[in-house]
Structures are given as C-alpha cells and as structure tokens.
Image (cartoon, grey):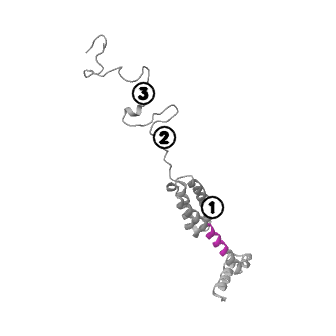
Amino acid sequence: MTNPNTPYGDNNDTNGLPSYGNETHQAGAVNHDQGAAYGNNAPVAGYGAGPVGYENTQIPAEKNKLAPWALGVGILALLSLLLVLPPFLLGPIGIILAIIALVKGKKLPKELSRTWMSVVGLVTSVLALLGAIGFIALGVSLFNSTGAQDCMGLETQVAVEQCLEEKLNTEINGETQQ
C-alpha cells in the first residue's frame, strides 16, 4: 500500500510486480557478471579477446598430400626397372618428393604426417635408382668381358651381328661355332 513515507508501496509488498530500485546496487553500477545471467559461469570477453568459447580452437591441419605422391613415384620407378631409362628420371624425382614430404610431415601432427608413405617412397625410389645403375653396370661388364668391343669396328651390320653372336656364344656356352 502507498503512503507519503513509502510512495511506491511497501518494500515487502510488490503486488506481483517487480520491485525496481530496491536492489542493493548503487546508482550507475553495472553488473559485469553476464555469464551468470545465462546459467553458466563463462568469462566475459573483453577488448582484444576473441569470441567466448573459441580460445583453444585450432584450424584443423590437412594430411600430408606430398607423401602419397612420393610413394606412387617410388613404386612406378621400381616397376619401370625393365625399361632402364625411367628409373633414372623417376628415382631422383621420388627421392626429392619423399624428402620434402618427410620435412613437411615433421611439422604436422603424427596422425596426419603419413611418414610411412614418405619412407616407403624414399626406399623404393632409391632401390629403383640403384637397380638401374646395377643393370647398366652389368651390361657394361658383360660387354667388356666378352670382347664385344672388338666387333664394333667392322664395316657392315651383318658382320657386327655375326661377330657379337660368336663372342656371346663363346662366353655363355664356352664353345665356338664353326
């Protein structure tokens, strides 16, 4: 009820209405505890802070995209050993890709680095390169040990082929053809 001493009614009698001005806050005071108003005790972002709840959020890193390429080039180089020339091209390319993939993979989390692909690509590229070098060394050694270089000075192609057949048959079978 209102009277001259209490023009807005009793402090205890609100008649179902909110009691404005009866708070314990002083005039001009601002309640900075905004998180409590929403049922949580989250800190309020101040100037220079990002949105609340994104403090520990990181941009997801992508998987190492170079590692599968290193693996593919290494396998292709190994399979191309029968052609001799492609391993000399694909081997160094695979080695370089694998090394770059390993370096990039160290900067990524372990589950995204694909280290095993980089290592397998490096190993297959090195094996292909060494295999190609071995095949060429074997060919040069066989060419020199049979005396086939003596046949290269002959005048006609038919004479060169016949000389090479005789030298190789002698080396392989240990017999001479008459």
Q: Quadrant of residue 140?
A: bottom right
Q: Residues within 10 Å of mark 2 (few under 14, many from 20)?
A: few
Range of magenta residues: 129-138
- Which residue is denoted by mark 3 in the rendering? 31
- Which residue is denoted by mark 2 in the rendering? 55
Q: Say if the magenta span includes residue 116.
A: no
Q: Position of residue 12 (x, y in %)?
A: 28, 22
Q: Residue at x 65, y 75 (%)?
A: 138
Marked residue nearer the N-terminal end (2 or 3) = 3
* Vertical relation: 86 (above or below) 48: below
The residue under label 2 is which amino acid type?
A: Glu
The residue under label 1 is which amino acid type?
A: Pro
Q: Quadrant of the N terminus?
A: top left
- Which residue is denoted by mark 1 in the rendering? 92
Q: Position of residue 77 (x, y in %)?
A: 57, 64
Instruction: Out of 72 and 87, give the one closest to the viewer.
Output: 72
Q: Quadrant of the C terminus?
A: bottom right
Q: Say if the magenta span includes residue 130.
A: yes
Q: Is residue 47 left or right of residue 163?
A: left
Can you see residue 87?
yes
Instruction: Out of 58 and 2, give the one closest to the viewer.
Output: 2
Q: Residues within 10 Å of mark 1 (few under 14, many from 20)?
A: some
Q: Quadrant of residue 28?
A: top left
Q: Quadrant of residue 135?
A: bottom right
Residue contact at pointers 2 and 3, CB within 8 angstroms: no
Which secondary structure, mark 2?
loop
Marked residue nearer the N-terminal end (2 or 1) = 2
Residue contact at pointers 3 and 1, CB within 8 angstroms: no
